[in-house]
Image: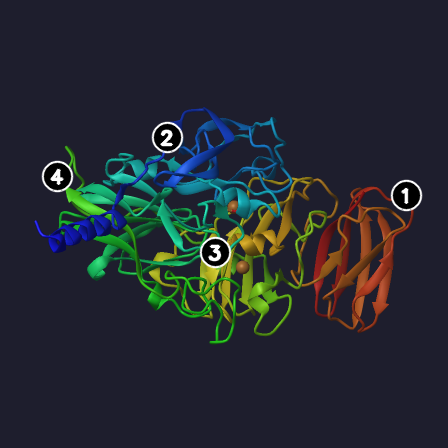
Amino acid sequence: MNTKIIGLLILNVQVASLLAQNPLLIPDTLSGSSINLTLQNGTFSFFSGQNTTTMGVNGDILGPTLILKKDNFVDITVNNQLSETTTIHWHGMHVSAANDGGPHTTIEPLELWNPRFTVLDKAGTYWYHPHLHENTNKHVSLGIAGFIIVRDDEEATLDLPRTYGSDDFPLVIQTKDFDINKQIVVPSNSDDVLMVNATIAPYLDVPAQVVRFRLLNGSSQRVFNIGLSGNQTFFQIASDGGLLNKPVVMNRLRMAPGERTEILIDFSDITEQSIQLMSYASELQNGTYGATRPGIGPIMTLNGYDPNPLNGNNFDILKFQVVAPTMNPVLSIPETLADVVPIPEISADITRTLFFTPESMGPNQLNGNFLINGLHFDMDVINYSIPLNNIEIWKITNQSAIAHPFHIHDIQFFVLDRNGVTPPQNELGRKDVILIDPMETVRVITQFTDFANDSVPYMLHCHMLTHEDKGMMLQFEVVDLTTGTRMEQINSGVVSVYPNPVKESNGTLTISGFSSDQVHLELYNMQGQKIIEQKIVTTIEPFTIHLPGNLHGTYLLNISGDKITHTQKIIVK
Ligand code: C2O
Ligand code: CU
Ligand code: CU
């Protein structure tokens, strides 16, 4: 053999190893009424021969897939063997605030947390992840994230693939940034390593039949524009909160951080031996993390964003290799799925208005903080008190230069419209995250049922974990007012009263947003006795009132004016 041929052979070997595909890791499952999860520090080889410091659940990376049954009770023990405080949140699930695992429900190192609840959710794909304020990105990026698959009788009657790891696969798609020592950098805007189920350059053997994939965008910031190579079509069958009415034929599916979808791919149709799951990121609009420019307009910068081959370029996510079918293959796509009944707009009790703004305007805004209604997250401030069973429209406007995936805990919502236009079929199902583009207004409708709690709030936030950690999050509580004398609470959604809770009697409450010339203000205790009555003739906002001494506990503030009626619970601590 001459040296030229040897050279070529060596070159071939190198190319082959660069393109080497790794078999997709499939997380183990846990099911039953008692589940033990241990949060632990670990090391994992994302790159062969190199160890990366990680965090995982019952292992070094990610966590087991929990398979839960609707209406069944589950008792979970979370054992924190990390060397730091964290929380575990059941994203998308309808559980009480105390079981929700938000930032208030901390688990100290070496401590146990024991949420117990009945599964009320429809069959679907949910997930769990840490939620400690300012640390969510770190704990998720280092590896803590797991799937929750809920099964129910409605889904069980459908002819759908549901054999885990055989014709039904979970796929958590993430990008991370590694330093030269192959350690994860967090936070970072230079996430150039793509992985599925913690596997870089993954492949999966799929049977030549209809196969179901449960997709989760578990990235800190990146939006994917999912598609198949060759523009092959696929079928979306579920959104965040479970099955759609019927399968929707798709060839692109935009997925923002926190979102889940379920899709069916018919591999019996596919004549190629392999096909790629891809992100057609070149088609993402500027003003999306993952597009050529992260902000609208060419000059908007985000530190560390460039250069990154994933931004604005199409890339492969997962290679499917078609193999022989299984014993009992599903061979067709069902005509119909679940009975999803959206909440009619007419039934709404109120509309709340929310808007997103950058803390500082201008071309550098993407590097700063983002605010919701001009506010920054404050652990001690409950931003909304929502009456139990209220049906609410939230009208959310993004006044910033980047798209934000907005998430609400506790509930699933329906999207009414995007900029006044009914959304596409695949967005008409139950959702808990919605990507809101720059200058877009999205209206969603939901109902706050079952769980009221005076002491633990739920979160509403941007699911870009960098934004969330930097305060793009507010909190709401669901209150049951039927025990008080004044039963109805009408929260106008525009009046804000702060601080709430107010830390002492003799304190001062500041009220803004009433925009009426004449306002009648009353404060009641829970026995229905009037504590304060004031008529305000002013156009000047904000307005302050002084609380008398020796108040303690829960009060109702009632504000009525020519343009507004607002009743809200005030807590004096
Ligand atoms: Cu996925 Cu508040 O979180
Ligand atoms: Cu959540
Ligand atoms: Cu955001």
Secondary structure type for disc 1 = loop
Q: Are marks 1 and 2 in contact (CB under 8 Å)?
A: no
Q: Are marks 4 and 2 in contact (CB under 8 Å)?
A: no
Residue closer to the observer: 46 or 493: 46
The residue at the far front in this view is 2
Kindly report the distance in space between the C-alpha atoms of the residues bearing marks 4 and 1.
Answer: 76 Å
Q: Are marks 1 and 3 in contact (CB under 8 Å)?
A: no
**Sequence-wise first label, 3 or 4:** 3
User: Label 1 sits on what residue type?
Assistant: Asn
Please say if 509 is above or below 163: below
| Residue that badge 2 annotates | 29
Q: Quadrant of the C terminus?
A: top right
Q: Which label sits on residue 550?
A: 1
| Residue that badge 4 annotates | 324
Residue closer to the observer: 224 or 17: 17
- Sort mark 2 into few (<14), some (14-19) or many (20+) by Cα contacts within 10 Å: some
Q: Are marks 2 and 3 in contact (CB under 8 Å)?
A: no
User: Label 4 sits on what residue type?
Assistant: Ala
Secondary structure type for disc 2 = strand
- 1 vs 2, front mark: 2
Kindly report the distance in space between the C-alpha atoms of the residues bearing marks 4 and 2.
Answer: 25 Å
Q: Is residue 304 left or right of residue 85?
A: left
Kindly report the distance in space between the C-alpha atoms of the residues bearing marks 1 and 3.
Answer: 47 Å
**Sequence-wise first label, 1 or 2:** 2
- 1 vs 3, front mark: 3
**Sequence-wise first label, 2 or 3:** 2
User: Label 3 sits on what residue type?
Assistant: Gln
Kindly report the distance in space between the C-alpha atoms of the residues bearing marks 1 and 2.
Answer: 54 Å
Q: Is residue 563 left or right of residue 150?
A: right
**Sequence-wise first label, 4 or 2:** 2
| Residue that badge 3 annotates | 221
